[in-house]
Image (tube, rainbow, N blue to C red):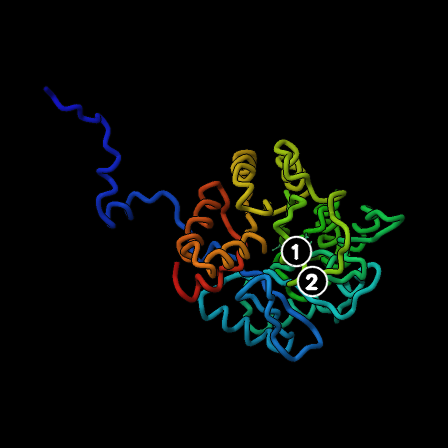
């Protein structure tokens, strides 16, 4: 009686830590990560975001301190979100030269000039109705919103933002921003477009973190999560309009889309591990169901493996502080 031997034995390369390390195909580096931060004006205290354990709204008066702290841990890039006390129908504070969008960029760049500042460019946190643009007849007016996009982009760029990151999912937003920036002489200011942005329930916790007033939903401007071809088309349109970096958002449930877009373009690709993805990991870990650090490694690793070059993640600071 003879034994049967497998011809191939992949286990040979998994026998030790060293073997596993040298044959690892994908790596996530601190340099790949962007930390989103929430900054609130006119308050003196930090405010914990109950649905995102570990995340705080930073009072504007502490922003300089926090940016310095981030820089010391090795964080190279932040994405700024403002919690406004100056909301109106159109979100005009976003294009006020002394408004919160401008001040966040100024404070970050003044404190740590080498920090890459990505200015989330939208209106929903600055409008009384919480929609991402100008509302006419119960619907968001695309082209009226584009004009305001240009204004906000120029104000953010002149305040020092390195990247304008439009997230309102309006048609033509990248072109409108590129034109406005170039007309104002901001040729070096880059655009990281939220180019494939799904209308996703994974943004749930962000609504509390960002203090948005929205009652309805964003399905007339953000994409149907069930659409694969449209997801590729949306990103390719933003490439044609002059985006420097594309993005898929959310990340974890859309790894196939990340791969599709990676193969359809040569532009750098970002992916946003959003508030709901963060919250699910945090709450499951707090309940003792999963190992947080390993799950973070796996989820971020999967996002890179799918084809993302950079990842926007609320875990960025933990990783920078504690290692990966
Ligand atoms: C603004 C914006 C949102 C997020 C980033 N920019 C909210 C939304 O589109 O509803 C979500 C980020 C997250 O959930 O972590 N438009």
At which x and y percent is residue 299? 46, 49
Any mark on residue 156, and which? Answer: 2
Determine whether label 2 and label 1 are within 8 Å by CB.
yes
> Quick one: label 1, few (<14), some, or many (20+) residues within 10 Å?
many
Q: Residue furthest right?
A: 137
Residue shown at 76%/56% (left/top)?
Answer: 214
| In front of the other: 12 or 244 | 12
Any mark on residue 47, and which? Answer: none
| Vertical comparison of 7 with 156: above or below | above
Secondary structure of residue under mark 1: strand
Visible residue check, residue 233:
yes
| In front of the other: 177 or 305 | 305
At which x and y percent is residue 46? 60, 75
Q: Earlier in the sequence, mark 2 or mark 1?
A: 2
| In front of the other: 62 or 314 | 314
Mark 1 CB lies closer than 8 A to ligand 1: no
| Vertical comparison of 242 with 282: above or below | above
In the image: residue 177, left or right of residue 231: right
Displayed quadrant of residue 231: top right
Q: Point out the image quarter for the C terminus.
A: bottom left
The residue under label 1 is 164
At which x and y percent is residue 272? 56, 51
The quarter of the image that holds ligand 1 is bottom right
Q: Residue furthest bottom?
A: 44
Q: Point out the image quarter for the N terminus.
A: top left
């Amino acid at each position: 009686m003879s034994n049967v031997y497998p011809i191939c034995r992949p286990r040979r390369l998994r026998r030790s830590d060293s073997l596993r390390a040298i044959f690892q195909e994908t790596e996530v580096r601190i340099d790949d990560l962007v930390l989103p931060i929430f900054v609130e004006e006119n308050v003196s205290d930090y405010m914990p975001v109950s649905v995102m354990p570990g995340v705080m709204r930073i009072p504007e008066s502490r922003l300089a301190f926090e940016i310095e702290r981030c820089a010391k841990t090795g964080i190279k890039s932040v994405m700024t979100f403002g919690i406004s006390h100056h909301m109106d129908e159109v979100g005009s504070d976003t294009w006020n030269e002394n408004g919160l969008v401008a001040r966040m960029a100024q404070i970050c760049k003044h404190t740590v000039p080498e920090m890459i500042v990505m200015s989330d460019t939208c209106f929903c946190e600055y409008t009384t109705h919480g929609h991402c643009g100008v509302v006419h007849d119960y619907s968001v007016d695309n082209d009226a919103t584009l004009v305001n996009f240009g204004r906000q982009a120029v104000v953010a760029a002149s305040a020092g933002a390195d990247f304008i990151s439009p997230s309102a999912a309006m048609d033509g937003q990248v072109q409108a921003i590129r034109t406005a920036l170039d007309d104002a002489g901001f040729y070096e200011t880059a655009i990281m477009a939220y180019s494939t942005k799904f209308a996703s329930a994974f943004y749930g916790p962000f609504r509390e973190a960002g203090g948005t007033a929205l009652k309805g939903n964003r399905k007339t401007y953000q994409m149907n999560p069930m659409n694969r071809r449209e997801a590729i088309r949306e990103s390719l349109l933003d490439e044609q309009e002059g985006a420097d970096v594309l993005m898929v958002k959310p990340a974890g449930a859309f790894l196939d889309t990340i791969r599709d877009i990676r193969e359809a373009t040569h532009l750098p690709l970002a992916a946003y591990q959003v508030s709901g993805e963060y919250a699910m990991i945090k709450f499951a870990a707090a309940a003792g169901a999963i190992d947080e650090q390993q799950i973070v490694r796996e989820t971020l690793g999967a996002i890179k493996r799918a084809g993302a070059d950079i990842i926007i993640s609320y875990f960025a600071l933990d990783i920078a502080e504690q290692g990966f």
